[in-house]
Amino acid sequence: MKKFAFTLFALLTVLTMTSCISSTKPFVDDFYKDPSISIEEKLEASGSSKLMLSEPEAYFDADIFRERYLELIEGAEDYILISTFLGSDCDGLNELYQTIARKAREGLRVYMIMDGTSSYDMTDTRYVMTPIYFLKDSGVHLIEYNPLSFLRAVNPKALIDRDHRKLVVVDGEYTCIGGMNMNYISLGAEGAALQRDSMYIFKSADFSKALTDQFVNIWNEISVEKLERSSFATIEDADTSRNTLTGYLFNQGPGSDQSMSAMFSALINSAREEIYMLPYLPLLDRNMMASFQSAIDRGVHIKMVIPLDMRGYTRKGTAFFFDKLVEMGVEIWYEKTGPTVPMLHQKLMVVDGRYTMVGSPNFNMRSMRLSYEIALVIDSEEFAAKALEQGKEREANMTYMDMDYAIESKKREGSFFCFLATYFGG
């Protein structure tokens, strides 16, 4: 077993080295560690798009967001741009997909990118999902990023190179980003089967322009059907005085030089007092661990609220790693309760009560190096306060994890093999 695990680790390491979308070197780069350089300078130097934003609509209930999403689709008049990691139909999503199909038949331009793993979803979605290729018959321009197939399987890069982003642009006026996929467990289930997550809707010309620019660039990178950016108009803000928030957009996609590692490095290495996180699958590599340790050594308090993952292999994989975080001095609150509690899939980071990161990336090596992600850093004490308040509401049913508990958890269900599979596969 040990020989097999070592062989698997060596193989996955080679795949990682030959398939890197970015790297985690920014976490230990002197530029990001330099205290004389402001966090704003670091974020801008990392290739972000600086935006002026109004207060977004924030959704933490998938049922409510789905209804609002349906309203946006129904009200669209020109075009809709969608990117999702997992996309599939089910009873709970049928109305949404049928509305998208109807709008496309009526002449609306709909372009949709979904990751090639959508038909191989390993969550509870697999029991109820219907592939959404039928949208093409209605005129939806639907493409898969890096679709899985027998022929592609001979290319190791195809196994781990994934597009994990979730975003929507409607008529160049509304933009949505967050962690919700367009599948059963994210938007179509009921009760405890429906994940706890977040989506944010912005009405901002700056944001719409940036996302549309990047969507067109990414589409043209991966599709034989080329788009003209000039054909997608953006609606200017009627009242720019409402744009009181400063945002830094990181859209790490094909052809982009933006980096999740650089964004997280700027935040962590600039933190002075506190880092509050709702991570998902927090499995850090050596560089990420070093940046955490450096922050803790200079007096920064790091708190993680970590959910219980219903998938057995990921739960065993993270259980194998908890003691490393506790040993460093990270304060961990962990969900012990069973499958009656909806899985917490939200991604959030708040630094020093001022800088808030929302979007799609998990805080692990995979999101830094092996998948495309989208994230927004908002500079606002008021927004950060609301994010912290909402994050603390997620702490119900959580238990403090000390070293004894971390070691007990590791012995009880930790698995090195599952750790490797989760570390690389997510």
Image (spheres, grey):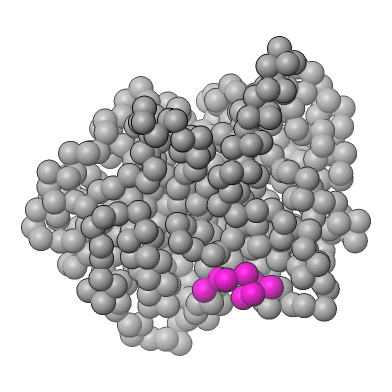
Q: Residue at x 37, y 59 (%)?
A: 221
Where in the figure is residue 182, as x and y percent of width and height?
Answer: 35, 43
Q: Residue at x 66, y 67 (%)?
A: 355
Where in the figure is residue 421, as x and y percent of width and height?
Answer: 61, 28
Tell me where residue 35 sits by quadrant.
bottom right
User: Does residue 117 appear to the left or right of 30 in the view shown?
Assistant: left
Q: Quadrant of the N terminus?
A: top right
Q: What segment is highlighted magenta in the picture?
A: 42-49
Tell me where residue 116 sits by quadrant.
top left
Q: Is residue 211 above or below residue 339?
A: below
User: Does residue 150 appear to the left or right of 195 in the view shown?
Assistant: left
What residue occupies the far top of the structure in this picture?
Answer: 1
User: Does residue 144 appear to the left or right of 162 in the view shown?
Assistant: left
Q: Is residue 411 above or below residue 155?
A: above
Q: Is residue 6 above or below residue 110?
A: above
Residue 124 appears in view:
yes
User: Does residue 409 appear to the left or right of 113 in the view shown?
Assistant: right
Task: Identify which residue, 120 or 311, lies in the foreground.
Answer: 120
Q: Residue at x 15, y 61 (%)?
A: 108
Q: Residue 173 magenta-drawn?
A: no
Where in the figure is residue 92, as x and y percent of width and height?
Answer: 29, 36
Q: Residue 48 magenta-drawn?
A: yes
Q: Quadrant of the C terminus?
A: top right
Where in the figure is residue 348, as x and y percent of width and height?
Answer: 61, 53
